[in-house]
């Protein structure tokens, strides 16, 4: 059976969901154009304090938002023949929005004197190019696409959680202009991305065969990493983000709750058949590693020992 024989019925079966997905993308594009640069108010009360309290968050989020430029190159390598609705989403809607998030955050970090993290805008890893080459084999590209949607789900959820905490922290500091005109509008655009991946993932998952599902689960488990981290230093940097956002000072219990939120969508999709597994353990383990590496870099141990009598 040729590849075209295999794909025709699948594409036909997808038509109705595709139009639902396409409508969602069109709506996102219309309702959420890139945030106008002129709408941002960088008025700050204490920029030095902002840098001290949230510098690591800002430099991390800026890098990750700017790196979507490379993510698009990765998608081109990974999915040689993507469905039109995916291309439309990531090229016309997602990339322009995220790039603007990066530009706005970048200006903020410059204004307050935070050392920027060098974004990798163009270098696609060997692993991804290799997966892309494998994707020319029947059935494999669907697995790559599934992994792309799953990464998107965890990434967008992590972004919303981080921006929620960042927003609350800015309000607490009294930095209302930055909270209202930088973080709030960025945060408003992330759930639409999440919804896209959720619809796309659900639809594709229902079409995968058993061996494809099995391989997807195995690969996901082995390759999961915290959002935007591609090496050990960046994993530790993410640990710093969690520290500044006070997401990890409650020890393992708090981190499990965070892992549950990040991993919920993929848990329901991939692992729900295994009753009792409340959180994909690999999500918790990578968050824990980030917390540990960040502490280790500062010569500390995570979680910090509780003072006696507490
Ligand atoms: Fe973003
Ligand atoms: Fe996003």
Image: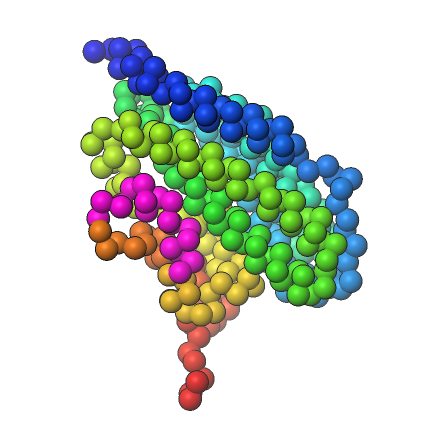
Question: In the displayed structure, would residue 221 be above or below residue 50?
Answer: above
3 vs 203, nearest the viewer: 203
Image quarter of the N terminus: top left
One can see residue 227 in this view: yes
Q: Position of residue 282 (x, y in %)?
A: 32, 52
Between 291 and 157, the one nearer to me in the picture:
157
Q: Is residue 164 above or below residue 295?
A: above
The percent position of residue 162, horizontal first and vertical second, equals 54, 54
Drawn side of residue 42 relative to residue 124, left or right: right
| Residue 54 in the figure: left or right of residue 86 | right
Coordinates of residue 294 in the picture (x, y in percent): 47, 63
Q: Quadrant of residue 49?
A: bottom right
Residue 60 higher or lower than 51, as above or below? above
Q: Which residues are magenta?
A: 257-274
> In which quarter of the view is residue 206 placed?
top left
Q: Is residue 267 magenta?
A: yes
Prevailing secondary structure of the magenta residues: helix
């Amino acid at each position: 059976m040729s590849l075209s024989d295999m794909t025709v019925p699948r594409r036909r079966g997808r038509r109705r969901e595709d139009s639902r997905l396409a409508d969602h993308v069109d709506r996102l594009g219309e309702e959420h154009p890139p945030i106008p640069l002129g709408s941002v108010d960088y008025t700050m009360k204490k920029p030095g304090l902002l840098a001290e309290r949230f510098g690591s968050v800002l430099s991390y989020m800026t890098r990750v938002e700017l790196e979507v430029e490379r993510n698009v190159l990765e998608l081109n390598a990974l999915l040689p023949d993507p469905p039109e609705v995916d291309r439309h989403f990531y090229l016309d809607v997602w990339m322009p929005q995220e790039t603007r998030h990066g530009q706005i955050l970048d200006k903020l970090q410059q204004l307050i004197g935070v050392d920027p993290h060098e974004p990798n805008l163009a270098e696609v890893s060997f692993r991804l190019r290799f997966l892309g080459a494998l994707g020319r084999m029947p059935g494999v590209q669907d697995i790559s696409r599934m992994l792309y949607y799953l990464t998107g789900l965890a990434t967008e959820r992590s972004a919303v959680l981080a921006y929620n905490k960042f927003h609350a922290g800015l309000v607490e500091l009294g930095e209302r202009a930055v909270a209202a005109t930088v973080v709030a509008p960025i945060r408003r655009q992330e759930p639409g991305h999440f919804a896209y991946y959720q619809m796309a993932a659900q639809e594709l998952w229902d079409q995968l065969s058993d061996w494809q599902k099995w391989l997807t689960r195995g690969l996901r488990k082995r390759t999961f990493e915290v959002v935007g981290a591609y090496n050990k230093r960046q994993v530790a940097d993410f640990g710093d983000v969690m520290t500044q956002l006070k997401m990890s000072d409650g020890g393992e219990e708090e981190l499990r709750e965070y892992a549950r939120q990040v991993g919920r969508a993929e848990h329901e999709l991939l692992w729900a058949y295994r009753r009792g597994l409340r959180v994909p353990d690999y999500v918790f383990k990578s968050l824990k590693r980030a917390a540990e590496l960040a502490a280790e870099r500062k010569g500390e141990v995570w979680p910090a020992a509780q003072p006696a009598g507490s």
